Amino acid sequence: MKQVNIYEAKTQLSKLVEAAAAGEEVIIARAGKPAARLVALQRPADKRPIGLLDGQLRIPEDFNTALPDDLLAAFYHQG
């Protein structure tokens, strides 16, 4: 971890950003007291490809048909 004062941070910002991007944590201090932390951003996870399971799943034709009345009643039964 590296600590620099605000003036040094302003004059060496590019180098400090490079250090942070490389994994180093940089603390920016005001009058010797830590005020901010410069760290690398988390890279977003790779996007999953569309159609990853294409052809591997089957949705039955009756998927959206209504449930039988006795089964529906079981959901609403107050016991």
Image (cartoon, grey):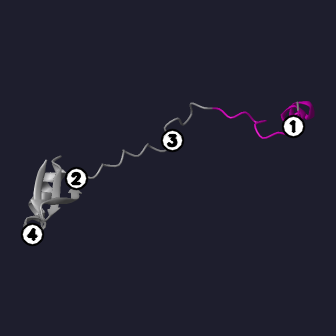
Q: CA distance from mark 4 to mark 1?
A: 68 Å
Determine whether label 4 and label 1 are within 8 Å by CB: no
The quadrant holding residue 8 is: bottom left
Query: Which marked residue is nearer to the observer: mark 4 or mark 3?
Result: 4
Name the kind of residue labelled 1 in the image: Tyr
Circle 3 residue: 51
Q: Position of residue 19 (x, y in %)?
A: 12, 52
Q: Position of residue 11 (x, y in %)?
A: 7, 69
* Badge 2: residue crowd in 10 Å (few <14, some 14–19, many ≥20): some
Name the kind of residue labelled 2 in the image: Val
Q: Position of residue 45 (x, y in %)?
A: 36, 45
**Residue 72 is inside the magenta segment:** yes
Q: CA distance from mark 4 to mark 2?
A: 18 Å
Secondary structure, mark 4, is helix
Reading the chain from its start, which is encountered first: label 2 or label 3? 2
Q: In the image, is residue 37 above or below residue 47?
A: below
Name the kind of residue labelled 3 in the image: Gly
Secondary structure, mark 3, is loop
Circle 1 residue: 76
The residue lying at 65 percent from left, 32 percent from top is: 58
Q: CA distance from mark 2 to mark 3?
A: 36 Å
Query: On the picture, is 69 further left or further right than 47?
Result: right
Looking at the rendering, the stretch of residues picked out in magenta corresponds to 58-78
Q: CA distance from mark 1 to mark 3?
A: 37 Å
Secondary structure, mark 1, is helix
Q: Position of residue 69 (x, y in %)?
A: 92, 35
Query: On the picture, is 10 further left or further right than 38?
Result: left
